[in-house]
Image (cartoon, helix red, strand yellow):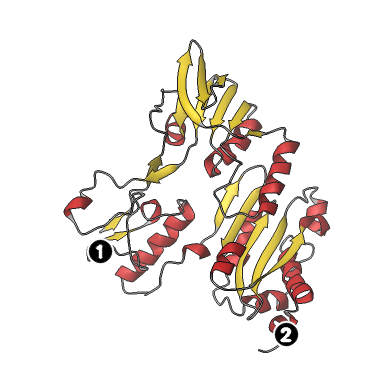
Amino acid sequence: IIIATGSRPALPQGIETVPRRILHSDELFDSGVPEGKRVIIVGGGIIGTEFAYIFTMLGKQVTWLVHSEPLSHTRYSEQAKDALTDAFAALKIEAQSGFILKKVGIHGDLAWVEGADGQRHEADWVLLATGRRPQTQGLGLERTAVRRDERGFIVTDAGLETDEPGVYAIGDVVGPLMNANQALADATLVVDRILGKSEARREPLWVPELVYSALELARIGMDEEQAEDADLEPAVGFAAFETSPRALGQDDAAGFVRLLADMDSGAFLGGEIVGRDAGELIHLLAQGSDRDTVLRQWISARYNHPARAEEVLNATETLAARWGLGDFLYGES
């Protein structure tokens, strides 16, 4: 048995939706975009960040209300978030921070939201992008040995098997990241284990994370904080697309490639790509199955020129030049 019931929108206590007027993202996909030019988006997570861009490109007048800053609870670097903010500014998209949702309602032809400070915002309709929670209620799990943690996520071992033998859980119900990439990786892992093809263990850090917005943001592996928590000393290799002939020729040179390596061993720890085609280029970083030697493979590979992928090479060479990792990357040991 594989539990794959996904997740559902998480609304603040006391907040309810109104058909075609005040919606969460599931209702938006089910019913389509409501009529009306003015829209309020509440929430600065991935869903809010993507739809703020999408609706602006569709010609909507977007009021975007967030608690702190867009993507504040993600693992993207400050450089990545700053680059996204600049891209939003160029499109005249601005997130209004400090908003804590307290009330919603309908007044005539308008929908409104009200914050903790009493300030009210009105529009034709509202999208509530206030997070998601695992869909683990009503499954009868209390009659089994399957456990859930305090947030409702199902507890599994590294092979995604629950405490009930033969019962597995995948995707959003396991968390903590809830996205299609992780769910697909989980599904492959579990089926292979059930069929006896593999004894692989779940490695959520090594499944790509993506944001498709005014800039594409992609990342994989550790960030600096996680590396330091693991008693590693991360070195940063950086290459900006503003020096890429391909990016300049496309007149789209915003963004960069950012790699982390262990100072002691030269092992690849993680990476981030921001800008056009980041969702495609991240697959170069995802192919590093042997993370102890993959940087050496990237630095010795042959690249098309001009190509955005060359910035992976340039960022790797920065690790050698700036951080003294040349012996690891060019040598034999």
Q: Is residue 193 left or right of residue 33?
A: left
Image quadrant in which the C terminus is located: bottom right
- Across and down, in percent, residue 25 comes to 46, 35
Task: Identify whether 20 is placed above or below 176.
Answer: above
Q: Residue at x 50, y 19 (%)?
A: 111
Task: Give left or right: position of 170 versus 58.
Answer: left
Q: Relative to 134, is 208 above or below?
A: below
Residue 187 figure quarter: bottom left
Q: Which mark is residue 163?
A: 1
Visible residue check, residue 104 = yes
The quadrant in which residue 122 appears is: top right
| Secondary structure found at label 2 | helix
Question: Viewer-proximal residue, 318 or 27?
Answer: 318
Residue 49 appears left or right of 300: left
> Disc 2 residue type?
Asp
Residue at 72%, 35% in the rendered image: 91
Q: Residues within 10 Å of mark 1 (few under 14, many from 20)?
A: some
| Crowdedness near tag 2: few (<14), some (14–19) or many (≥20) residues, C-alpha within 10 Å | few
Q: As drawn, is 6 to the left or to the right of 42?
A: left
Q: Position of residue 26 (x, y in %)?
A: 43, 36
Q: Which mark is residue 327?
A: 2
- State the separation of the CA atoms marked 2 and 1: 46 Å
